[in-house]
Image (cartoon, helix red, strand yellow):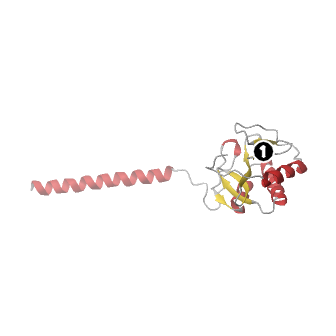
């Protein structure tokens, strides 16, 4: 009889543990934030209003990033993208680290941009080699920045010149020393 009681006690204990585990997992699922990548969901905005977009290659992820940029920054993103494509028709696009990247196949990336609270930062990965040198300094000697604020007028001629020059230089390749 004692053996039967022991078997019954073990079964009851296993059921109780199973119920607790199932309840805990169910509660975690209910409490977990909804994925920003659900179909039809708007991407989350990170610090400074930078859209959180899944990494990906091609025009579609870059356009998803631009469409998710908040307010006036969206228009800046659209104008930058159009100018880059007009200036470098063979440009390759991707979204990496929640930013659109622009490059040339086999050469690496020459430019990206990123939203901050009060400006959009354009990074030229070999910017120190451009003439004239873009105004924003970086802790990396080769990189130069251009910050575009809400009411700034983009000098399309100068920007196109920088884009053309940057695209002609060897680009930045993640993991490869500069």
The image shows residue 35 at horizontal and vertical percentages of 57, 55
The image shows residue 129 at horizontal and vertical percentages of 79, 44
- Badge 1 crowding class, 10 Å Cα cut-off, few under 14, some 14 to 19, many 20 or more, is many
Q: Find residue 118 and report its image quarter.
A: top right
- SS state under label 1: helix
Residue under the point 10% across and 53% down? 2
Is residue 61 rendered to the left or right of residue 163? left
The image shows residue 62 at horizontal and vertical percentages of 71, 57
Q: Find residue 39 and report its image quarter.
A: bottom right
Total number of numbered labels? Answer: 1
- Residue 122 visible in the current orientation: no
Q: Which residue was labeled with disc 1? A: 127
Quarter of the image where the N terminus is located: bottom left
Residue under the point 81% across and 53% down? 80
Image position of 33 with respect to 118: above or below = below
Image position of 103 with respect to 139: above or below = below
Is residue 22 rendered to the left or right of residue 138? left
The image shows residue 112 at horizontal and vertical percentages of 73, 50
Residue under the point 84% across and 60% down? 86
- Residue 147 visible in the current orientation: yes
Is residue 132 rendered to the left or right of residue 116? right
In depth, the one of 136 and 27 nearer the eye is 136
Q: Find residue 145 and report its image quarter.
A: top right
């Amino acid at each position: 009889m004692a053996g039967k009681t022991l078997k019954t006690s073990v079964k009851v204990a296993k059921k109780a543990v199973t119920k607790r585990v199932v309840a805990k997992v169910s509660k975690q699922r209910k409490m977990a934030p909804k994925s920003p990548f659900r179909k039809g969901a708007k991407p989350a905005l990170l610090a400074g209003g930078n859209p959180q977009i899944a990494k990906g290659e091609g025009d579609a992820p870059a356009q998803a990033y631009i469409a998710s940029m908040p307010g006036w920054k969206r228009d800046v993103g659209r104008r930058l993208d159009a100018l880059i494509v007009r200036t470098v028709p063979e440009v390759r696009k991707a979204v990496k680290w929640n930013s659109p990247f622009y490059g040339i196949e086999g050469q690496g990336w020459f430019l990206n941009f990123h939203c901050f609270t009060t400006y959009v930062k354009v990074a030229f990965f070999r910017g120190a080699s451009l003439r004239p040198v873009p105004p924003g300094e970086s802790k990396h000697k080769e990189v130069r920045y251009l910050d575009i604020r809400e009411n700034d007028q983009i000098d399309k001629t100068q920007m196109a010149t920088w884009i053309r020059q940057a695209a002609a230089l060897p680009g930045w390749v993640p993991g490869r020393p500069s």
